C-alpha cells in the first residue's frame, strides 16, 4: 500500500480508537506491516511525522515489518517472499496492491500461482497507549 | 485492533454523490457493457463521473472503452487518470495483460486496498462494474460502502432471472437500495421479465435489444455513441431523473 495513504489510514483509525477510549493524548502507537506491502520505511515514517497532529503530537510510533511467508496450495511448499527475482515494475505493482503477487510470483517448486499468504500481508494497529 | 484501511474507505468516497454498482446474478449478461455505457452517458450529460472496474479476475471495461496507455498518478495515494472525461480505475494498471488468479480473501484484500488508496475527485456518480453473482466482491461492497445503490442486469433467460431474484432478495434483506432492473440482449417481445421484476416490488428500468453492431464498436469512441445500445441506455437514464 502506498505510504502516504497508509499513514493517513493509520492516523484515522487510531484517532477513532483514541476517541472511543477517551484518550486525551496518545503516547505510543505500534503498527505491524506485512513485507508484501513493500513499504519504504523512511517514507512511511516521514508521512507519519507529517500527519501527527493534536493528540498524536508526542506519540512514539513504532513500525514492525513481518516477513511474508507463502504456501503453495498445489504442492504444499512453503517459502519466504523475496523481491530479488522480481523486476522493478512487478515490485511496484505489488507495492500498490499486494494481491498482484499472484500475477508475478509462482511457487518455486511447482510453478503454481495458487498460493496462500500465511503471513506478511496487510497492516495492523497492534496497540495504542495514551493518557485519559 | 483491526485493519486501519477500512477506516479510510468512506473517507475516500465522501465527495461522491451517488455510487451505483452494476450487478447481476449471472455471468455474461452485459454488466460490463451496461456499466461502461452508463458511465459514458452520464458524462455526456455533463455529470462528473468515475468508473471503477471491480472485476479483478476478468476486467473488461477498458476493452469496451478502448482505454490503454494511461496510468494513475501517485500523490499521497492514487489519483485515477481521466479518460474520455471519466475518472477511470482498474486493476489492469497493475496487472497489464497478465492473468490475476485470486481466491476469495485475496479478492477482498485487493478490493479494500484499492478502495482505501484511490483518491476520487468530487463526483456526481461513481459507476462500479461488478463481477457476477453474490460472492466476495458483492458482499464486500455492501459491507464497506455506505450509500451504495444496485442497478441489476438480467436477460430474457429464466436462468438469468432466477439468479437475479436471489440477488434482489439478498439486497432487500440487507436494506441495500435497488435502483431497478435492466433487461439486456432482448430478442423477442415477451414481457415476462418486466412482470417478474415488478412482482418483486422493484422498478423495471427498460429493455436493451440484442445489438449486432456492438461487437464492431468495441473500443471505438467514434462508434459506441451511435449504437442502439447507447441510445437505449440514454433513454433509461432520462427516465431515472438523475440531476447533476
Ligand atoms: N445488447 C447486447 N447486444 C449484443 N451483444 C451484447 C449485448 N450486451 C452484451 N453483449 C455482449 O455480450 C458479451 C458479454 O457482455 P459483458 O461482458 O458486458 O457481460 P458481463 O455481464 O459483464 O459478463 P461477466 O459476468 O463475465 O462480467 C460481450 O461480448 C458483449 O459485447
Ligand atoms: Mg463483466
Ligand atoms: Zn507448488
Image (cartoon, coloured by chain):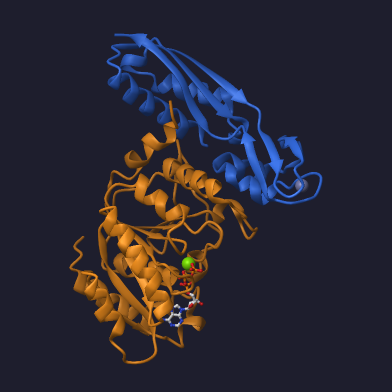
Residue A61 placement (x, y as % from top left):
47, 15
Residue A69 placement (x, y as % from top left):
68, 34
User: Chain drawn blue, letter?
Assistant: A
Of all residues shown, which one is farthest toward the right? A109
Would you identify the image quadrant in which residue A121 lies? top right
Q: Residue at x 65, y 49 (%)?
A: A102
> Which one is in front, B90 or A81?
A81
> Which one is in front, B198 or B117?
B198
Residue A76 placement (x, y as % from top left):
75, 43
Residue B239 placement (x, y as % from top left):
20, 74
Would you identify the image quadrant in which residue A67 lies? top right
Q: Is residue B10 above or below residue B196?
A: above
Q: Residue at x 78, y 50 (%)?
A: A111
Q: How many numbered discs sit on the rendered protein?
A: 0
> Which one is in front, B22 or B237?
B22
Does residue B198 appear left or right of residue B189 in this picture? left
Of all residues shown, which one is farthest toward the top? A131
User: Chain drawn orange, letter?
Assistant: B
Q: Is residue B97 above or below residue B206?
A: above
Q: Is residue B107 above or below residue A69?
A: below
- Quarter that holds the C terminus of chain A: top left
Q: Residue at x 46, y 56 (%)?
A: B135
Does residue A8 appear left or right of residue B47 in this picture? right
> Which one is in front, B42 or A37?
A37
Q: Is residue B226 visible?
A: no
Would you identify the image quadrant in which residue B237 lies? bottom left
Q: Is residue B87 visible?
A: yes
Q: Residue at x 77, y 47 (%)?
A: A75
Amino acid at each position: 500500500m502506498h505510504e502516504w495513504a497508509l499513514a493517513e489510514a493509520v492516523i484515522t483509525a487510531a484517532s477513532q480508537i483514541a476517541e472511543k477510549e477517551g484518550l486525551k493524548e496518545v503516547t505510543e502507537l505500534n503498527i505491524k506491516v506485512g513485507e508484501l506491502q513493500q513499504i519504504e520505511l523512511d517514507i512511511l515514517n516521514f508521512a507519519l511525522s507529517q500527519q501527527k497532529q493534536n493528540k498524536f503530537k508526542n506519540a512514539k510510533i513504532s513500525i514492525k515489518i513481518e516477513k511474508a511467508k507463502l504456501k503453495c496450495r498445489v504442492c504444499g511448499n512453503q517459502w519466504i517472499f523475496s523481491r530479488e527475482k522480481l523486476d522493478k515494475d512487478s515490485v511496484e505493482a505489488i507495492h500498490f496492491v499486494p494481491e498482484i503477487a499472484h500475477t508475478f510470483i509462482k511457487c518455486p517448486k511447482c510453478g503454481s500461482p495458487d498460493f496462500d499468504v500465511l503471513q506478511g500481508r496487510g497492516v495492523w494497529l497492534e496497540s495504542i497507549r495514551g493518557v485519559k | 485492533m483491526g485493519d486501519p484501511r477500512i477506516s479510510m474507505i468512506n473517507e475516500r468516497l465522501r465527495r461522491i454523490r451517488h455510487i451505483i454498482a452494476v450487478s447481476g446474478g449471472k455471468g455474461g449478461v452485459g454488466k460490463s457493457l451496461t456499466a461502461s455505457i452508463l458511465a459514458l452517458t452520464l458524462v455526456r450529460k455533463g455529470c462528473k463521473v468515475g468508473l471503477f472496474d471491480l472485476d479483478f479476475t476478468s476486467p473488461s471495461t477498458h476493452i469496451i472503452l478502448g482505454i490503454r496507455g494511461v496510468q494513475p498518478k501517485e500523490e499521497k495515494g492514487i489519483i485515477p487518470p481521466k479518460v474520455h472525461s471519466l475518472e477511470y480505475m482498474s486493476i489492469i494498471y497493475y496487472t497489464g495483460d497478465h492473468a490475476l488468479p485470486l481466491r476469495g480473501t485475496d479478492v477482498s484484500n485487493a478490493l479494500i486496498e484499492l478502495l482505501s488508496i484511490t483518491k476520487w475527485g468530487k463526483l456526481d456518480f461513481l459507476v462500479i462494474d461488478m463481477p457476477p453473482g453474490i460472492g466476495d466482491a458483492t458482499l464486500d461492497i455492501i459491507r464497506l460502502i455506505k450509500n451504495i445503490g444496485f442497478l441489476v442486469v438480467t436477460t430474457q433467460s429464466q436462468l438469468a432471472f432466477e439468479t437475479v431474484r436471489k440477488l434482489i432478495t439478498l439486497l432487500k434483506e440487507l436494506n441495500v437500495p435497488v435502483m431497478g432492473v435492466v433487461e439486456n440482449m432482448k430478442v423477442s417481445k415477451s414481457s415476462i421479465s418486466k412482470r417478474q421484476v415488478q412482482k418483486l416490488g422493484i422498478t423495471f428500468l427498460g429493455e436493451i435489444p440484442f445489438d449486432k453492431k456492438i461487437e464492431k464498436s468495441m473500443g471505438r469512441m467514434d462508434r459506441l455513441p451511435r449504437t442502439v445500445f447507447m441510445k437505449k441506455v440514454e433513454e433509461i437514464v432520462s427516465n431515472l431523473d438523475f440531476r447533476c
